[in-house]
Amino acid sequence: MTQRHVLLVDIVDEPEATAAYEAFHAAGAVPTPIVASIRAAGIVAMDIYRTGGRLVMVMETDETFDPAAKAAADAASPDVQAWETKMDAFQRRLPWAEPGVKWVEARRIFSLAEQH
């Protein structure tokens, strides 16, 4: 059974910055070790959307996904750390983010499936 996660972060809202960020995330542009680390964590699907200066990430995870284990693996990976440092130049933490948290998980408040 998969679980959906929706996460948000802001981005530098300048045309050159958003164009560069989007280019770094274009099909085939994300480095292979980054993609491998995402898949190895039990993330079976991931999409990032942008509107203005806000990014929204939608992830589908399998039963093996453990956020703490993913964070530990990322912290131990020089490739992931280099990627995160590169992305930090573009991303802006949300004002209500906990210290050390970049992508803030959104809480679902509505589901059509739960409606009559």
Image: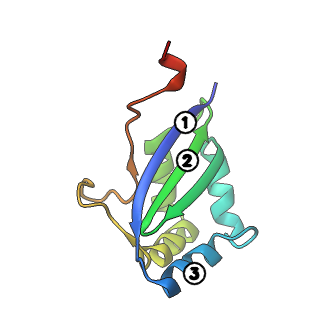
User: Label 1 is placed on what type of residue?
Assistant: Arg
The answer to which of marks 1 and 2 sits earlier in the sequence is: 1
Dividing the picture into quadrants, the one containing residue 99 is bottom left
Which is closer to the viewer, label 3 or label 1?
3
- Count the numbered circles shown: 3
Q: Residues within 10 Å of mark 1 (few under 14, many from 20)?
A: few
What residue is pinned by disc 3? 19
Secondary structure beneath label 1: strand
Q: Position of residue 23 (x, y in %)?
A: 64, 77
Residue situated in front as seen by the camera: 110 or 98: 110
User: Regarding mark 3 in the picture, which secondary structure is present there?
Assistant: helix
For residue 31, which numbered disc appears in the image? none
Report if the CB atoms under discs 3 and 1 are less than 8 Å apart.
no
Which numbered disc flags the more N-terminal residue, 3 or 1? 1
What mark, if any, has residue 58 been given in the picture? 2
Amino acid type at circle 3 is Ala
Identified at 50% across, 38% down, the residue is 66
Which residue occupies 60% across, 39% down?
60
Q: Residue 85 in the image: state x and y as whole percent.
A: 45, 75
Q: Quadrant of residue 32?
A: bottom right
Q: CA distance from mark 3 to mark 2?
A: 20 Å
Q: Which mark is residue 4?
A: 1
Mark 2 burial class by Cα count in 10 Å: few <14, some 14-19, many 20+: some
Cα distance, mark 1 to mark 2? 7 Å
Please give the name of the residue rendered at 60% of the width and 45% of the height, measured from the top-left corner: 41
The answer to whether marks 1 and 2 mark residues whose Cβ atoms lie closer than 8 Å is: yes
- Residue at 55% from the left image edge and 47% from the top image edge: 58
Number of residues whose C-alpha sits closer than 10 Å to that of mark 3, classed few (under 14), some (14–19) or many (20 or more): few
Marks 3 and 1 sit apart, C-alpha to C-alpha, by 27 Å
Looking at the image, residue 98 lies above or below residue 5: below
- Residue 78 left/right relative to 39: left
With 80 as the anchor, is 100 left or right in this view? left
